[in-house]
Image: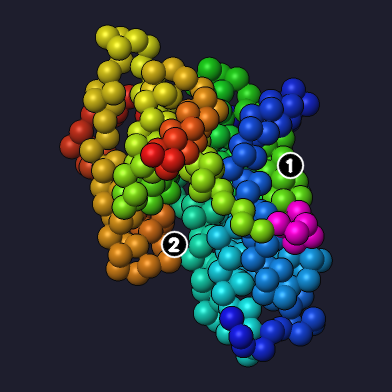
Amino acid sequence: MQIKTTWQGFREGVSFALPLQLGIFPWGLTFGLVASQLALTAPQSIGMSAVVFSGTAQMVILEFWRMPLAWIPLSLAVFSINARYLLQGATLAPWLKQVRPIHRAALLWPMVDVSWATSLERFKRNQAQSEPADFGFMHGMQIVCFSSWVLSTSAGALLPLQGLDMKKWGLDIAISAVLIALFAGNFRWRSPLGKRLPWRHWQWSWPLALLFAWLSREAFGGHWYVIVGGGVAAALAAISATSGAEPKEEGSAS
Amino acid sequence: MTSPNLDTSSAWAVIAAMGFLAGAIRLSGPWLAQFIPQSGFVRRWIELLPDHLLIALMMPVFLSPDWRIQVAAVAAFMIRAVGGSALLAMSIAVAVLATLRTM
């Protein structure tokens, strides 16, 4: 696989990420507000956003913010929330193994769900078209997301904001909507009566991912549902595919 | 929360430790991937993983007890499926959800 890192890709990543801050910024504001109410200083709130860079994990850390500190439960909780990044990073390995470790670290450390999903889709599309994957795009996206997260936390911690209600404006679905849209792009409808119809590309294991994720959340709580739901369903599909029980599907992201 | 707050050194120790943990997790994926056999079932599993991880990530939205969130999620899906951009899908979903919540 060919790779490159360009300023054009960087600008495209920045352009793509900027509107997404509609969904990210309010969360950072909320975190900064909640943290200040727990007597974290502004530098502590901002510092946490800068080094942890994970909204859900940071909220969980606040839940443990008292003496004596429960290190092991806290670490397990943060690990479970972020464990999906292990698998996400593994899916990028074919491209990342071609770059130097420090460049790889610069790409992976600020990775979030939307930058992973968007970049992976682009890399696969580049591969299908025999074009090099442009890491500049991923850098651009992540710099915007990181900057927005830290700035919004700062605003929440420093400004006298009260009664912020992102649900009133529907902003709580912004990031999820982007992830849904990335997945929906697999179907590639061309017209209502076009050649590619969605049910032709339906992977039988996709509803299983939903089901297993739901069961996992009901049984174990926390955020293991992403790994359990996605991992188990993908494993079943892989078993079926490698046993020759079904033809290779078309129209998926791969 | 009324329990004694963390002192300054403890607070920064927690922040540093959790930052290290979060960073280590993010950096470990490709490192672990090199120990994964690149053939047969495992390779196919890795290829299928992105779609299934995405779906699992979306589970709280599609199975939300709030029907308005489900409607907004379907709207995002449909906009993209008929050729709209991901950003348009996001904007429509946000607008749909905000509108439904005012009703």
* Quarter of the image that includes the C terminus of chain A: top left
Q: What chain is tagged by disc 1?
A: A
Q: Is residue A244 above or below residue A193?
A: below
Q: Which comes sooner in the sequence, label 2 or label 1? A: 1
Q: What chain is tagged by disc 2?
A: A
Residue A144 included in the magenta stretch of the image:
no
| Residue at the disc numbered 1 | A143
Q: Residues within 10 Å of mark 1 (few under 14, many from 20)?
A: some
Q: Is residue A193 left or right of residue A179?
A: left
Magenta range is: A155-161
Where residue A223 is drawn, which disc sits there?
2
| Closer-to-camera residue (A72/A46) | A46
Q: Is residue A198 left or right of residue B50?
A: left
* x then y, percent, for residue B80: 43, 24
* Quarter of the image that includes the N terminus of chain A: top right
Q: Residue at x 58, y 34 (%)?
A: A119
Indicate the quadrant where residue B102 lies. top left
Label 1, secondary structure: give it: helix
* x then y, percent, for residue A216: 32, 62
Q: Residue at x 57, y 51 (%)?
A: A165
Give the alpha-carbon distance from disc 2 to disc 1, as whole Å: 25 Å
Q: What amino acid is found at the position of numbered circle 2 in the picture? A: His
Indicate the quadrant where residue A222 lies. bottom left
